[in-house]
Image (cartoon, rainbow, N blue to C red):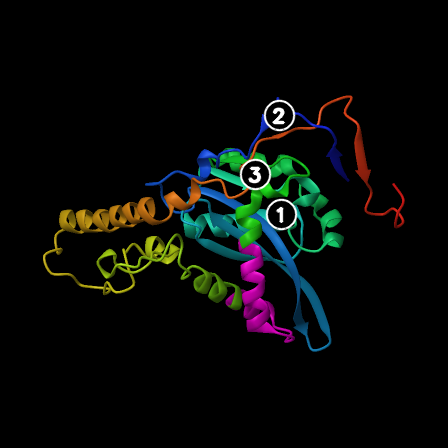
Amino acid sequence: MRILPRNGTQDGDSIIANLPALRLAPYTPPFYMTACDYFEPYNVKISRNKTAKHYGVLFTCLNTRAVHLEMAVDLSTMEFLQGLRRFLAIRGRPAVILSDNGSQFVGAKKELRPMVSDINEDEVKEFCGEKGMQWKLITPGAPHQNGCAEALVKTCKRALKKAVGSQVLTPLELYTVLLEVANLVNQRPIGRIPNDPDDGSYICPKDILLGRASSEIPQGPFKGTNYPRHLVEFVQKIIDSFWKRWSRDVFPSLVPRKKWQVEKRNVRPDDIVVVSDPSALRGKW
């Protein structure tokens, strides 16, 4: 339902809010602030004549925009917690995990959303509390609050569609493809692409995940960094280099308001409105 105010004035106006602090936290470890979402069931081959549906689980860092993909056999609480435990074992423990609320936890087809009610939010919060993490749910009916995860779900689904096509994979094959897609998505540029050669190449999430400032840096060994103290300082310089370039190339693109820049009056009690019902017949109001 959309409500359209009539004869509005300019008092009590509102514009788009600033980005939350979770999105603007440089010099934090990757996945320190994380958002997650389910997506798209995929048919997998269990045996010669038997197939089942498996789901993708996306975790994304709200600052570096890095992606981690896991696979879920079903939409139960225990299965989600198993995927979360695998994520924690690989990426470490985040301070905050942001997810959709209740029946909107699935960012895929509408018919899947009622099924996700099997996920017990209290059990998930209790698990996160034991690990020292904060589980934050977005406002019901406001999926844009988890837009970071929704946008990357779309990107990953597009890459999976090109990679898999109409093939029916085994569970392990699907899991392998999910990992390869996450690796591919983590190579995308974030922020602006520098025009000046002196600025270096673009930065991508994989730079911080691999602990190096660019893909041109070799794996090693490095001269002059044979002592533990030198190695620690070297790694810190690389991380500092990434965040400095992030502050230069990415942060400025997050601050400007890209829409809702003009103040407009909000709907208030006693306003005369026109209600648009999407299920109504044409011309009926």
Q: How many marks?
A: 3
The amino acid beneath tag 2 is Gln
Q: Which residue is mark 2?
A: 10
> Does the CB distance between marks 1 and 2 fall below 8 Å?
no
Between marks 1 and 2 in the image, the one whose residue lies nearer the viewer: 2
Q: Which residue is mark 3?
A: 260
Q: Nearer the viewer, residue 236 or 214?
A: 214
Spatial separation of the CA atoms under disc 1 and disc 3: 41 Å
Q: Is residue 119 left or right of residue 231?
A: right
* Mark sitting earlier along the chain (1/3): 1
Using the image, tell me which numbered label, if any, was put on residue 150.
none
Q: Residues within 10 Å of mark 2 (few under 14, many from 20)?
A: few
Q: Is residue 265 above or below residue 181?
A: above
Image quarter of the N terminus: top right
Residue at x 75%, y 35% (from the top left corner): 3
Q: Which residues are magenta?
A: 152-176
* Mark sitting earlier along the chain (2/3): 2
> Does the CB distance between marks 2 and 3 fall below 8 Å?
no
Using the image, tell me which numbered label, if any, was put on residue 78.
1
Between marks 2 and 3 in the image, the one whose residue lies nearer the viewer: 2
Task: Residue at the far bottom: name it.
Answer: 48
Residue 268, x across and y down, in percent: 71, 24
Q: Element at badge 2?
A: loop
Residue at x 23%, y 63% (from the top left corner): 217
The amino acid beneath tag 1 is Met
Residue at x 60%, y 43% (from the top left corner): 144
